Image: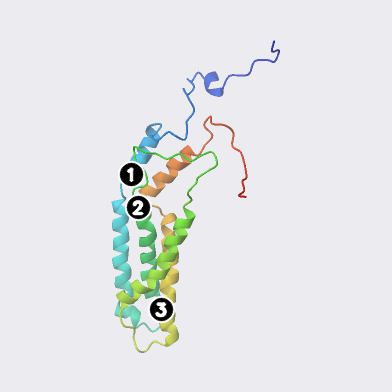
Amino acid sequence: MDASPPRDPPAAVQAGEAPAAYPAAPGDISPRDSREAALCDSASHPDWFYLGGLAILDVGGVAFGSSDTVKHASSVALRLTGPAAIGLVWGATVGGAWLALPKCSPHWVGESPREGTVRGSVPLAVSLALLAGATAPIITGIAVGPLPISWTTLESEMHLVAAGVAGFGGALLPYLLPPRTWAAARELEHLRFQVDGRGDPFIGYGGTF
């Protein structure tokens, strides 16, 4: 006969709430409640306003960087703001356009395993930043056209370097000001990243032989 004292009921039962019929499982592919359904619906359509804003910034950056006022300015620092502006808006377009695309499907809401998220966003973010940094000098060269003959060789080289560095940094800016799709997808992932009856969190290790 078990002489141990009875265990206290769960907090939900003590509060008079009905406990869940079963814990959430990794196989759940549908939104669990109205909050998740709203977030998934928000993340399932492209953020056209964000994409339109990026297009406007591209036009403004190219117009500024290719203007004769900037190309023939008396200050070298001011002349380098042209390629930097073009590289910045181009990088923001490369990085932000992907974030603004659909990130959820109402018929398939992913669930991370107990070990954590399998696919991270950092490698893709760095890859897009490298792509933007590599292509920004090309876009700048096309937009600006022939450089003034008064520019020195060093200044012409720095013209491309400034565009590349600005392009790399610009691709990371959308993560600070994310579009609606990415913000909703991250919040949905945060809601699902919790211990919901499948067991206590743990730390493990593995090896290959």
State the residue position of label 2: 100
Residue drawn at point x = 38 percent, y = 70 percent: 136
Is the residue marked by circle 3 packed among few (<14), some (14-19), or many (20+) residues within 10 Å? many
- The image shows residue 66, relative to residue 149, as above or below, that is above
Is the residue marked by circle 1 packed among few (<14), some (14-19), or many (20+) residues within 10 Å? many
Q: Quadrant of residue 104?
A: top left
State the residue position of label 1: 44
Q: Secondary structure at mark 3?
A: helix
Q: Amino acid at mark 2?
A: Ala
Q: Is residue 105 visible?
A: yes
Q: Secondary structure at mark 1?
A: loop
Alpha-carbon distance for marks 3 and 1? 40 Å
Q: Position of residue 11 (x, y in %)?
A: 56, 23
Q: Amino acid at mark 3?
A: His
Alpha-carbon distance for marks 2 and 1? 10 Å
Confirm or deny contact between disc 3 and disc 1 (CB under 8 A).
Answer: no
N-term mark: 3 or 1: 1
- The image shows residue 142, relative to residue 171, as above or below, that is below
Give the left or right position of residue 146, taking residue 23 as reference: left
As rendered, which of 52 and 76 lies closer to the eye?
52
Q: Quadrant of residue 51?
A: bottom left
Alpha-carbon distance for marks 3 and 2? 30 Å
Q: Amino acid at mark 1?
A: Ser
Give the left or right position of residue 1, taking residue 8 as reference: right
Is the residue marked by circle 2 packed among few (<14), some (14-19), or many (20+) residues within 10 Å? many
Q: Position of residue 66 (x, y in %)?
A: 31, 76
State the residue position of label 3: 159
